[in-house]
Amino acid sequence: MTSQSEKAVSLDSLRAAAQQARLTLSPDELAALHIELSHVLDYIDSRLPDASSSEDVQPLVHPVLHAAPPREDLPLASLPLEDALRNAPRVRHGYILVQRVL
């Protein structure tokens, strides 16, 4: 039985996504992942209402409703340099020293 999601997600698109994620998948792993992803997408489809029923849904402006408007952005005094560097592990010439990343 072929699900709607198996049609929506092709093996080629799954292979391309794995390649972009730098995953090396065997053909068996790719087939298993395709089936698992199809089951997940089928489950999501079963929980979501039809796209046609979203006509009466108001657009979401912000995910959090604010009881008060945001405060005005005013410049304030900054933290003194000595206080900012007080807990730094190593300091030189007013800068925090860190290990090289690259």
Image (cartoon, grey):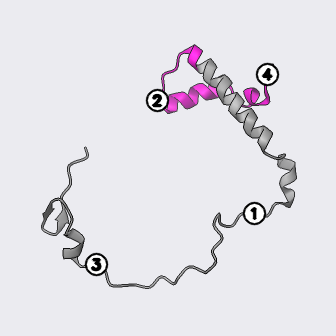
What label does residue 59 carry, if any?
1
In magenta, the rendered stretch is 1-29
Q: Would you identify the image quadrant in which residue 74 lies?
A: bottom left
Q: Which comes before the other along the chain, label 4 or label 3?
A: 4
Q: Quadrant of residue 64?
A: bottom right
**Residue closest to the eye, 35 or 20:** 35
How crowded pointer 4 is (Cα within 10 Å; few <14, some 14-19, many 20+) is rated as few
Tag in front: 3 or 2 = 3
Q: Earlier in the sequence, mark 4 or mark 1?
A: 4
Closer to the chain start, of discs 2 and 4, is 4
Disc 1 on helix, strand or loop? loop
Per the image, the residue denoted by label 4 is: 2
Residue 63 seen in render: yes
The percent position of residue 92, horizontal first and vertical second, equals 12, 64
Amino acid at circle 4:
Thr
- In the rendered structure, which amino acid carries the disc numbered 1? Pro
Residues tagged 1 and 3 counted as in contact (Cβ below 8 A): no
Q: Position of residue 45 (x, y in %)?
A: 77, 39
Q: Amino acid at mark 2?
A: Arg
Check if residue 27 falls in the magenta segment: yes
- Residue 61 picture location, percent across and down: 69, 67
Amino acid identity at mark 3: Leu
The numbered disc on residue 79 is 3
Tell me which residue sits at (56%, 79%) in the image.
70
- As measured in the structure, the alpha-carbon distance from the residue carrying label 1 to the one carrying label 3 is 41 Å
Q: Which residue matches tag 2?
A: 22
Mark 2 to mark 4 CA distance (whole Å): 28 Å
**Mark 3 or 2, nearer chain start:** 2
